[in-house]
Amino acid sequence: IKSKIKPTKIKNEINLCGKNLDSIKNIALKSAKSDVNILLLGESGVGKEVFAKFIHNHSNRSNEPFIAINMAALPENLLESELFGYEKGAFTDASASKTGLFELANKGSIFLDEIGDMPLSLQAKLLRAIQEKEITRLGGTKSIKIDVRFISATNANIYEKIQNHSFREDLFYRLQTIILEIPPLRERQDEIISIANSHLKEVAKAYQCGNKKLSPDTIDTLLSYKWPGNIRELLSIIERATILSEGEYITKDDLFLESRNKKVSKCEELERQYLKEAYIANNNNLEQTAEMLG
């Protein structure tokens, strides 16, 4: 079921306060006024795109485009054409020229999410785009100047990827003029209830659920849960509980967190066993195991 709640709504729900977040917010605000490249690190679902928009909205480019792309979501050939664009006849289906995202983001900011998963073959082209501030469309010969602010993010261990030669060290240093490491939601407990209440009101209004509140037991349950999916998981749970709950108060049973805890635990156990068996099957070769598992 497609949600009526737009993901961009949460940008005002994150107070950017609490453990380490005051200093992160200050760095983000200082960085926003410049054009330096920023690398956001943190677990999946912590709000890296929200931070990227926060930086863009407080920059001198705030009235220009903000374009986001997930580097892990597209195969290599499509990713290249999306980023750089292509000329007519560049490949079989190229019946007309297409403007790439770098050109569309001109004068604004581009957010490269999951940059750690960018194919190695494209990293050299990205490095040149950052260094020279110009790109060449696929099938083209003419260089096109771009004026773009680069914000990137990853939940991968980027330092490990550099050591394993799956991520270029020179590209890393270009992307990380400033690094912001966003802590997981479990370390930002003072945000949990404010985000939950704000999203509850939006969901209740969108689905005409009436005036709903979190019961004291529900609040305690939300604060004690570990949130492996971070803010994304919290928003999903609150949306479902608001829609399915009966009466004025959302109870802890409406959250279904007990079954979720058991499910996560069992999944982790199965995954560990699967990884172990794959590792043994590849004669304890880590690289071969990783390649086999994708």
Image: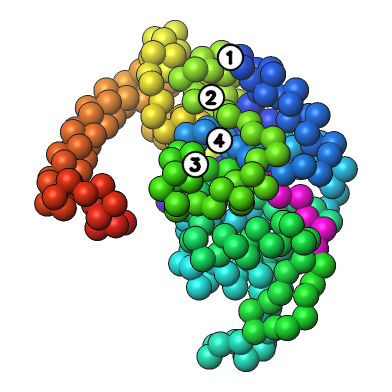
Circle nearer the N terminus (4, 3) = 4
What residue type is disc 4 on? Leu
- Of marks 3 and 1, which one's residue comes earlier in the chain? 1
Element assignment for label 2: loop
Chain-order first, disc 1 or disc 2: 1
Q: Mark 4 points at which residue?
A: 41
Which region shows up in magenta? 146-151
Mark found first going from the N terminus, 3 or 2? 3
Q: Which of marks 4 and 3 is in front?
A: 3
C-alpha distance separating marks 1 and 2: 8 Å
Percent x, y of residue 254: 35, 25
Tell which circle, 1 or 4, labels the residue nearer the N-terminal end. 1
> Label 3: which residue?
158
Q: Circles 1 and 2: CB distance less than 8 Å?
A: yes
x, y percentage for residue 248? 47, 19
Q: Callout 1: few (<14), some (14-19), or many (20+) C-alpha neighbours within 10 Å?
A: some
- Given this view, does label 4 or label 2 mark the residue nearer the observer? 4
Q: Nearer the viewer, residue 64 or 243?
A: 64
Q: Residue at x 52, y 43 (%)?
A: 154
What distance separates the C-alpha of mark 4 from that of mark 2?
9 Å
User: From the viewer's perspective, is the residue at label 3 or at label 1 nearer?
Assistant: 3
Point out the frontmost of discs 3 and 2. 3
Q: In this view, does 140 lie above or below 51?
A: below
Mark 3 residue type: Ile
Report whether residue 251 is seen: no
- Tag 3 near tag 2, CB within 8 Å: no
